[in-house]
Image (cartoon, helix red, strand yellow):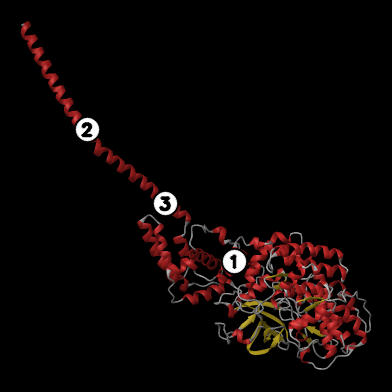
Amino acid sequence: MSGTDNLSGQHNDASAELRINGRFQVLRETSLPPIGGAAAFVATDPLAPGMGYAALAPDDVSARLEQYEAFRHPALMPVLAHDRLEGAPWILTLRPSGPSLASLSGPWRESQIVNSVIRPVASILMQAQQLGLTLRNLRPDNLYPGVIAQEVLVGPLGITPPAFLQPLVFESLSSAVCSPAARGYGSIVDDVFSLGVVILTLCLGKAPLEGLSDEDILRRRFELGTPQAYLRDQPVPAGLVSLLQAMLSDDPSQRPAPVDLVNMETSKLFSVRREKFTRQALPVGPYMVRSRRALAWAATRRPEEFVDLLRCRQVDAWLKKDLHESALSEDIAAAGIELVRTGGVDTDGGALRRIVHTLDADAPLYGGGQWFWPEALPTMLALEAAGRNPAASKGSCMAIATQVLASETDYVSWAGLLGSQLRQLGQEARRTGQKGAARIRRLIYDGNIWQRCLSPLCLSRRLVVASEALKALDASMAGRDVPAATAVRSGLIDEQMRAFLESHAVRMGFHPRSALTTGEMPLWLQDFALLAWLQHRSADSPPLPGLAAVTFPLLNGELKIWQARSERERRATELRKASEGGILHEMLDLVVNTIALRQDRIAGQTAQHEFEAIESQLLHQKTFMPNVDADTRRLAAFVTMSSGIGLSIVSCVYEMLH
């Protein structure tokens, strides 16, 4: 999982002092064997020099870390403190007093197992059940010798994705069929099963079915049932046989509750209702199916052969005649009609998924060629992006998430854990306010504040702090020249960086998609606005000259939207000053200031209207004045002539009278 090599990629010198919560010093030059799958280092407390502490540097932290930190039990290595140092998570716990149980050889005695393992671990499980938590980390290499009455200590919780490091043999069938990333938190009965396998391992001195491949282990467990596959012909103490048969049952309802194990005595008997197996097997490809649970698994392994059997009505006939499941037979026959009607193998559609769910309601969801629990989809997506989910081909988890969310209405009526997880996943997706691939990427970060940024710039440094991601981005931009065409097409940051920063911005009260007029802004400017807001709101974010220098030419080009030449020149001058200082929000305000821009547009429109009015008036005068002059001349000539005639008449009359 995590290792010291991972930390070498960090930009800070290993000699730089790290103190968890300002108190516990991390000695990065003194490493310890990994604890719980995380890289471990010696930590010291100046106030208690004699205490043995370990500082853990996990790659992928559980979203429930705070809940696990509050969980205390004498048989549990506690999460004493956590901190974000250099932008990465660090966890403080106690240093184990010795190597894990995986290094101890030889079978244990029955009384030793009951007193040192079953009782203390069952007590942890009982307390976890009351808190609504699960452990999902019970395996020999995560159990350590304790100091109280020789009881074992369980490794710290929350430092890996749930059940991610569990070997398949330690997982119940509902989890074992999934890839490690797809197992989810499960329920307390999954921890009871894992404890049962730990007990069996201590009895045998080795893990059951050792040497077989995961595929062969699954095949044997489905064909025989897990208790039979694990316990047959094994030298298990007689007093533990009935206990292990109950704990290893493939039916979760048959496993004992933690309260039944807390007061466990040697040779205590447990009764188990055996799973129904048929005498006559139903061959599905190479698999010999004898139970409904095995039929569900074989159907996903050999869908073509399974569809052929459905078409020939052999499946429902076998269920009715050999398994004596008449109602189930009718349900499968009806569901099979829909699958057969497609004329092919609908492995990614809902028909096969519904048939599998009908056969085994305790099974996880099947789609895209793999089993998974819906609550684990964010983890699957994260580990796929980090290249740590070998069970999934590139892009397959994204396709699965897209298909599941698109078919959300199909699961409204589904009951149980699977139905509730599907509905919860749909709610989380809608809460992002986005669509398509961006919505799915946000699922990685929105539900887990400890999810490291999966951008290639941040991945090796385990960055979970937005301001540190900004620093890494700024350092990568130094001296670079981003062509305008590239920025317009793909933005300033990669998709994982964008999802990580958007998720952190939303937690801080800023909703990028609703706060910005994204329809009018190019993608690169949306990215810049997000970066500027985060820099402004992060108290520990320094100037970002690299980002400022790269975006200055792009922002300067955006000033053309300002109509007043003097205003453009003034803003260009101030933009250059802000760029030199690396203050992004000042640069953004000079370019995208809605109030000032509106005033500029109003002033421009007013000036334009005045100009048009003057121009219209001048044009009117140019065409009207020549007509006025001609009329005036004619009127003047008429008045002159009339006046002359009048004077002549008056003169003549005057002469005649005198």
Q: Which residue is mark 3?
A: 601
| Residue at x 38% of width, y 61% of height | 570
Please, is residue 308 above or below residue 562 in the view?
below
Mark 1 or mark 2, earlier in chain: 1
The residue singled out by tag 2 in the image is 627
In the rendered structure, which amino acid carries the disc numbered 1? Answer: Ala
Quadrant, the C terminus:
top left
Residue under label 1: 437
Foreground label between 3 and 1: 1
Between 372 and 58, the one lying in front of the other is 372
| Real-space Cα separation, disc 2 to disc 3, in angstroms | 40 Å
| Residue occupying image coordinates x 83% and y 84% | 230
**Closer to the camera, 263 or 317?**
317
Residue 487 vs residue 589, the one in the foreground: 487
Relative side of 645 to 428, left or right = left
Residue at the top extreme?
657
Q: Amino acid at mark 3?
A: Arg
Q: Is residue 248 above or below residue 513?
A: below
Cα–Cα span, label 1 and label 2:
72 Å
Q: Are marks 1 and 2 in contact (CB under 8 Å)?
A: no
Residue 88 coordinates in the image, percent (x, y): 61, 78
